[in-house]
Image (cartoon, rainbow, N blue to C red):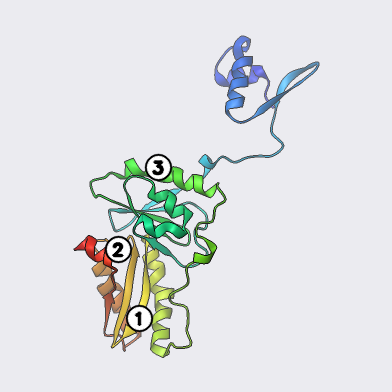
Amino acid sequence: MATYRQVGRLLGISARISSPLAVRAYQFAGLHWTPHIGVTRRWSLPPFSVVSARTMFIQTQDTPNPNSLKFLPGRMVLEQGTMDFTAPREAYCSPLARQLFRIDGVKGVFLGPDFITITKTDVDLEWKLIKPDVFAAIMDFFTSGLPVVNEEDTPRADTAPSDDDDEVIAMIKELLDTRIRPTVQEDGGDVLYCGFEDGIVKLKLQGSCTSCPSSMVTLKSGIQNMLQFYVPEVEGVEQVKDEQEEVAQG
């Protein structure tokens, strides 16, 4: 514990005026002091320690898409699967995504196992103008106690084994889960399995991959080549787009 005089030295002020300033400094820091009769007044810590949300360490990581940035809060985001929100109206099931969409310049929110990918609206909008608000929103959310996703809307694994899967589809799903998706998620995105028909694997790109300039290279040169190498029945890979993506890219 530090006396007024010791606190004064730390603050660079004289002992004569250190007492009132020290009181204000400790109050500002969230601590309190307890006077004792006949004993120099000393500071006592609260009975429990409260870690401020501002001490949460959030890292950022660039993605191949210059309009998308990956935020790593240092804790689990989703227990399973991923979720992609391309518009505020889609975020009804996620309190975290709704909070992030309130930030000016946020176009898309993607939730992964331990990361959050933010896509901005304009290539000319600098990240330094958005990042402080994103940091604050993430820190405030994780101290609120709210669920990331409402329990009834928890994502289901699209590559989960099914009784209807034949050997080829089972192999495709296994490759997606073990070889392809982890690599894509490292870049702040994901790829969802949408079906296999007439030798064509249908996949949907999400997160940073959605509007990435190199997404077709990833799809054809990366994913397609790997699937064809291990599964000869695969003749090609086709990207599935929803209506919003076609309008945005059209």
103 or 41: which is nearer to us?
Answer: 103
Q: Secondary structure at mark 2?
A: loop
Q: Where residue 159 sits in the image (x, y, percent)? A: 43, 77
Give the residue type that dot 1 points to.
Answer: Gly
Give the residue type that dot 3 points to.
Answer: Asp
Q: Where residue 115 sits in the image (x, y, percent)? A: 44, 57
- Chain-order first, disc 2 or disc 1: 1
- Tag 2 near tag 1, CB within 8 Å: no
Residue 225, placed above or below residue 128: below
- Chain-order first, disc 2 or disc 3: 3
Q: Where residue 203 sits in the image (x, y, percent)? A: 32, 74
Mark 3, Cα crowd under 10 Å, few <14 / some 14-19 / many 20+, is some
Is residue 57 in sight in this rendering? no
Residue plotted at (29% across, 77% down): 224
Which quarter of the rendering shows the C terminus?
bottom left
Residue plotted at (47% across, 84% down): 162
Residue 65, placed above or below residue 23: below
CA–CA distance between discs 3 and 1?
A: 38 Å
- Tag 3 near tag 1, CB within 8 Å: no
Residue plotted at (69% across, 34% down): 46
Q: Disc 3 marks which residue?
A: 133
Give the residue type that dot 2 points to.
Answer: Thr
Q: Where residue 105 sits in the image (x, y, percent)? A: 31, 47
Q: Which mark is residue 210?
A: 2
Q: Disc 1 marks which residue?
A: 195
Residue 231: name its quadrant: bottom left
Mark 2, Cα crowd under 10 Å, few <14 / some 14-19 / many 20+, is many
Is residue 123 in sight in this rendering? yes
- Left or right: 45 with respect to 24? right
CA–CA distance between discs 2 and 1?
A: 18 Å
